[in-house]
Image: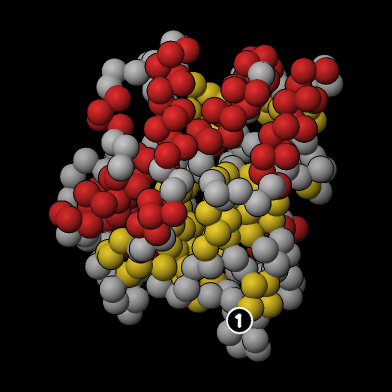
Amino acid sequence: MYKLEAMQPFNLSNQSEFESWAENKLSLYADDCLQTLLQPILISGDGSIAASELERLRSHIRDYNLAIYRVSDKTLFNKESIDRMSRWLGLKQLDAHLCVGEDLISTITDTSQMPGDQRRTYIPYSNKALSWHTDGYYNPYHQRVQAFILYCQHAASSGGENSFIDPEIIYLHLRRENPDFITALCKADVMRIPENVQNQTCIRAETASSVFQISDDYRHIDMRFSQRKRHIIWRDDRVTQQALESLNGLLNEDSAWRINYRLQSCEGVISNNVLHRRSAYKDDVGQSRVYIRARYYNRITATNN
């Protein structure tokens, strides 16, 4: 299997190095490689991890920006366990968005039948389907979400499947199709999110950003994107619109690089904020789907136990 260390140093601004990186990246989506990715990494109930499992996690994050995990004892797993995980993942600053409590960790469940709950107005806190997006695409750029930990405390009675796509895959396909698409989607104002006004009060100012953000050393690609139709304004030039058409086509087609996985209770995802979506779901009476989510302003390093 391709390992990032074997490619060092590489530079996405160099075309030959980009092509070598792209070929190795695509080779990771052979069936045997994906079967390894879909075998959950074991994490203890207190949020600790064995050295061998940590190495597997490093490999999955390096190759896919995504790792699936399973908690050995869900009776011990809580938000303190997530805090411990964040430390050995190298994650530092939590995202303080509108729907978090004092601990800055979200509980995601269907709030449509909870009068007075402010989360009711946001689709993630319903049982409806969620289209392709990265978390926090509406945040100010200096508070962009670069990683998240997701934990399924209780699975839905039916539905609620998650799908994931590594932004690096989208980047390399668009670049190969037309390099001008990358130029257009790297513009700092290609995507604008209008201000969020509630009860005549602005609770989040308008934001503008690029879709792709390339690190200064040209080794990391981050992405900010939403496929939603409302409350998002795109640059109206020809190349941008063509790039978006191609991007949405890549997301919507049934391809080898789309990872479909229905999390079971006590399973979760660790990610460098990959693209993801959720199917609609149904809950039985008294059996609500409950997810726990923590979002961070830096990428995963996973350097220590």
Any part of residue 114 in sight? no
Provide residue 280's location: percent of width, then percent of height.
70, 67
> On screen, 49 above or below 57?
below
Q: Residue at x 72, y 39 (%)?
A: 248
Q: 210 and 111: which one is in front?
A: 210
Q: How many discs mark residues in the rendered view? A: 1
Crowdedness near tag 1: few (<14), some (14–19) or many (≥20) residues, C-alpha within 10 Å: some
> On screen, 248 above or below 36?
above
Provide residue 243's location: percent of width, then percent of height.
73, 26
Q: 296 and 116: which one is in front?
A: 296
Which quadrant holds residue 189? top right
Q: Is residue 12 left or right of residue 126?
A: left
Q: Disc 1 designates what residue?
A: 157
Circle 1: element type: loop
Q: Is residue 85 left or right of residue 224?
A: left
> On screen, 3 above or below 154?
above
